[in-house]
Amino acid sequence: MDILFLTKSKKYTCKTLKYLLKYHTVVGVVCKKKEVVSGTELEDICRNYHIAIFEHNEIYQMIKLKKMPHVDLAISNTYGRLIRKELIEWTGGNCINLHGAILPKYKGLYTYNHGLLNGEKEWGVTAHYVNEKFDEGNIIKIKKFPINADIISVKELERETQKTAYELTLQIVEEWEKNGSLPSTPQGAEGKYYSLEDFEMEKKVSITDKAVVVKRKIHAFWCPPYEGAYIEIDGVHFQLLP
């Protein structure tokens, strides 16, 4: 199959790319900006296998000029950009995203933090078709795993999620090669889209918060080198350490 991979350089996305190269033709790797992958393992793999790296906007220009190579399947993982109608149509709707949370419950951004904050007992990765909105396409498959939200860190949850995303990607690609387009089900109306504003609001500790809430916020938002939970006094941020 001819596959387009939309991603960024992480341990398991690089592992995914190596798998795809072993069994399929990767017609290109798409990233937000080329400088984002400069000096990374992802760039090294692409260079060694002579795979073109495209920037987000470059793809749409190529489609417009009809210079885009044939694509049987587009796979997005940790891409972080809205995939537009032109690319979805170019793939014939065969564009799949690996979302690092269980849909439709956790849509959007910073889902790891909110999952820990909410005390979830399981987590997972959702393979879904891409439409013109973030995380709202029909669901193909969800692969879940148990967690202890009071113990697992954000970075550990990300690592386990990416490991699961790798495993699910292999399943999806193998099934796609055998059967073609895979069956899916529409998402229900439940769940929530988490935004940057939600993230900033939730990690702010109020003087009236109970101790158990403060403890959970500190744990859920602790992810150095980024600012975690904080309390604001006289307009000054004081970061709270675990």
Image (spheres, rainbow, N blue to C red):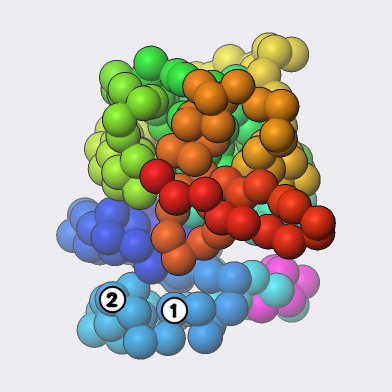
Q: CA distance from mark 1 to mark 2?
A: 8 Å
Residue 242 falls within the magenta-colored stretch:
no
- Considering depth in this image, is 169 or 227 the residue closer to the camera? 227
32 or 6, nearer to the observer: 32
Q: What residue sits 71% from the left and 27% below the top?
A: 208
Magenta residues span 58-64
Identified by mark 2, the residue type is: Glu
Where residue 43 appears, x then y in whole percent?
Answer: 35, 80
How far across and down, in percent of the image, does residue 155 sit?
35, 49
The kind of residue tagged 1 is Val
Q: Quadrant of residue 23?
A: bottom left
- Mark seen at residue 41: 2
Residue underneath mark 1: 37
Task: Answer few, some or many: residues within 10 Å of disc 2's Cα (few below 14, many 20 plus, some between 14 and 19).
Answer: some
Give the residue at x 44% y 78%: 37
Tell me the element at label 1.
Answer: helix
Residue at 44% from the left image edge and 38% from the top image edge: 219
Tell me which residue sits at (31%, 22%) in the image: 148
Q: Position of residue 113 (x, y in %)?
A: 52, 38
| In the foreground, 174 or 117 | 117
The secondary structure making up most of the magenta span is helix
Whether residue 123 sits left or right of residue 211 in the image: it is left
Coordinates of residue 132 in the picture (x, y in percent): 76, 43
Residue 78 vs 92, above or below: the answer is below
Q: Secondary structure at mark 2?
A: helix
Q: Residue furthest left?
A: 22
Question: For this view, does 210 lie left or right of residue 113?
Answer: right
Tag 1: Cα neighbours inside 10 Å, few (<14), some, or many (≥20)? some
Is residue 59 within the magenta segment?
yes
In which quadrant of the rendered image does the C terminus lie?
top left
155 shown above or below 168: below
Count of numbered labels shown in the rendering:
2
